[in-house]
Image (cartoon, grey):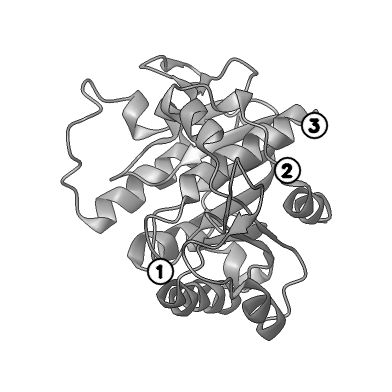
């Protein structure tokens, strides 16, 4: 991280310890960004690393529901303690702080950005090897503030096969380049469907443009995830840690961070 960027970074809670910070972002909503964030954290925790998820998607937080978490945060002299999943993943989300998670968040962008920053400065993150930030969709004020205020070590971009999304994901890639944060990989979600009868791949949202984008922007690591009803059911039931998804290509890129 260069000296210019360092001067804007907010200090971590003095009692916390976070080694690496990975932002998971998308150029638009509806591509499964939170699903990928959850999958990466579950896979990395399963590999023996201590993981955390900072849910920065304040207006549409879905991480707690994926793990079946309720209001279980509490405060001590060290700060606000995040909720832990069954396997020990630390999670902080606005939905864990409000009385009714279904109430809409009617906040302006500056207030949302301040809340995300407080998740970094006021929460007690205990010995985290890899923190995954579930970013709000798009490339507006809040993502910009997060990239300027938190020491993000790398970005994973999430996309889907549609042509329009190809254009939008390029905006996310260019934003990362402008912020001088390395792109660790691109995940194309809902890339295809495997028929349970004939076992063939069907590209129901059209053919992938993933390799074209990766070649254009010199991104070495990328994976395509299928539509999988079983994993979707695990998420819906709050049992995300039972999912079985091969994220090795992206995990290897994350593990190479200096």
At mark 1, the secondary structure is loop
The disc, 1 or 3, on the residue closer to the chain's N-terminal end is 3
At mark 2, the secondary structure is loop
Name which residue lies at 42% across and 16% down: 75
Residue 232 locus on image (x, y percent): 48, 35
Q: Is residue 200 visible?
A: yes
- Residue 110 as seen in the image, left or right of residue 20: left
- Residue 2 as seen in the image, left or right of residue 7: right
Rendered image quadrant of residue 189? bottom right
- Give the Cα distance between marks 1 and 3: 31 Å
Q: Kindly identify which numbered label has been placed on residue 139.
A: 1
- Are there few (<14), some (14-19), or many (20+) residues within 10 Å of tag 2? some
- Are there few (<14), some (14-19), or many (20+) residues within 10 Å of tag 1? many
Count of number-bearing discs: 3
- Write down the residue under mark 2: 246
Q: Is residue 81 visible?
A: no
Residue 20 locus on image (x, y percent): 70, 46
* Camera-nearest residue between 14 and 241: 241
Q: Kindly identify which numbered label has been placed on residue 47.
A: 3
Q: Nearer the viewer, mark 3 or mark 2?
A: 2
Residue 9 locus on image (x, y percent): 54, 57
Q: Name above or below for residue 117 compared with residue 209.
A: above
């Amino acid at each position: 991280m260069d000296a210019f960027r360092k001067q804007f970074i907010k200090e971590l809670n003095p009692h916390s310890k976070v080694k690496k910070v990975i932002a998971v972002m998308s150029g638009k909503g509806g591509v499964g960004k939170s699903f990928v964030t959850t999958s990466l954290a579950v896979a990395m925790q399963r590999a023996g690393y201590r993981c955390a998820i900072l849910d920065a998607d304040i207006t549409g937080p879905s991480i707690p529901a994926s793990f079946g978490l309720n209001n279980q945060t509490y405060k001590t002299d060290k700060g606000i303690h995040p909720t832990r999943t069954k396997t020990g993943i630390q999670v902080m989300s606005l939905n864990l702080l409000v009385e009714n998670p279904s109430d809409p968040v009617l906040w302006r962008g500056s207030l949302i950005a301040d809340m995300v920053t407080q998740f970094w400065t006021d929460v007690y993150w205990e010995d985290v090897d890899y923190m995954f930030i579930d970013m709000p969709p798009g490339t507006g004020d809040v993502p910009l503030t997060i990239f300027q205020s938190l020491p993000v070590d790398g970005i994973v971009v999430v996309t889907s096969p549609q042509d329009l999304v190809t254009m939008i994901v390029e905006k996310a890639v260019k934003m990362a380049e402008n912020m001088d944060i390395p792109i660790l990989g691109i995940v194309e979600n809902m890339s295809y469907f495997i028929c349970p009868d004939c076992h063939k791949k069907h590209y129901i949202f059209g053919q992938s443009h993933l390799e074209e984008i990766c070649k254009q922007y010199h991104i070495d690591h990328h994976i395509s995830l299928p539509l999988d009803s079983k994993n979707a059911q695990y998420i819906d039931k709050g049992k995300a840690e039972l999912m079985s998804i091969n994220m090795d290509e992206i995990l290897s890129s994350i593990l190479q961070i200096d």
